[in-house]
Image (tube, grey):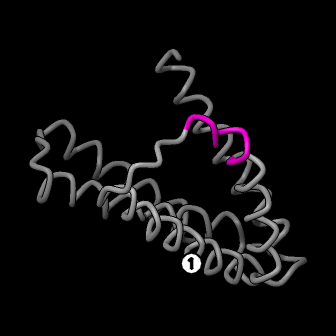
Amino acid sequence: MNTLLLFAICMTTWGLGTFIMKIVGQRLDPVTTVGFNIIGYLSVAIFLFSRMSFALTRYHLLAIPIGIMFVLGNLAFYRLASTTEITILVPLTALYIAIPVLLGVLVLGEPMTVRKGIAFLLAAGAIYLLSTT
């Protein structure tokens, strides 16, 4: 698949999904909402099942805590969605980008160029400006 198309799919589905998360988070309790999210995950997993690798390596096992982290993050998001404006909630929770960027540089040895550093600071600044009233 084309890289640009994949970026567009990520941006569109995550953006719409986050917007809908806010609407649902105001009307359902977080546990119920996450339970129904899991039905959504499973409905996609059924179609992917035949393409899955069933070897049991440490990377297969690491995929399990990733799911746990996303479920816990979604629970926290839904709890916040019931009391926080989306214009504040989304930019502040978007600060999660700092963690993988820093770990990518420190742990994986990915290069942090001046250009990337400036872009990261501008993105963080934009998120800060969007989230303050």
Q: Secondary structure at mark 1?
A: helix
Residue extending furthest toward the top: 2
Quarter placement of the C terminus: bottom right
Residue 46 colored in magenta in the image: yes
Q: Position of residue 73 (x, y in %)?
A: 55, 74
132 is higher (above) or lower (below) than 18 = below
Task: Name the residue rendered at 77%, 74% in the picture.
Answer: 35
Q: Is residue 88 left or right of residue 110?
A: right
Q: Where is mark 1, residue-wise? A: 72
Q: Specify the principal SS of the magenta part.
A: helix
Q: Position of residue 28 (x, y in %)?
A: 87, 79
Callout 1 environment at 10 Å: few (<14), some (14 to 19), or many (20+)? some
Task: Name the residue rendered at 37%, 56% in the picture.
Answer: 56
| Quarter of the rendering containing residue 19 | bottom right
Q: Position of residue 54 (x, y in %)?
A: 47, 48
Task: Name the residue rendered at 63%, 71% in the picture.
Answer: 74
Task: Name the residue rendered at 73%, 46% in the picture.
Answer: 46
Residue stretch rendered in magenta on the structure: 45-51
Q: Nearer the viewer, residue 79 or 31?
A: 31
Q: Position of residue 7 (x, y in %)?
A: 52, 30
Residue extending furthest toward the front: 55
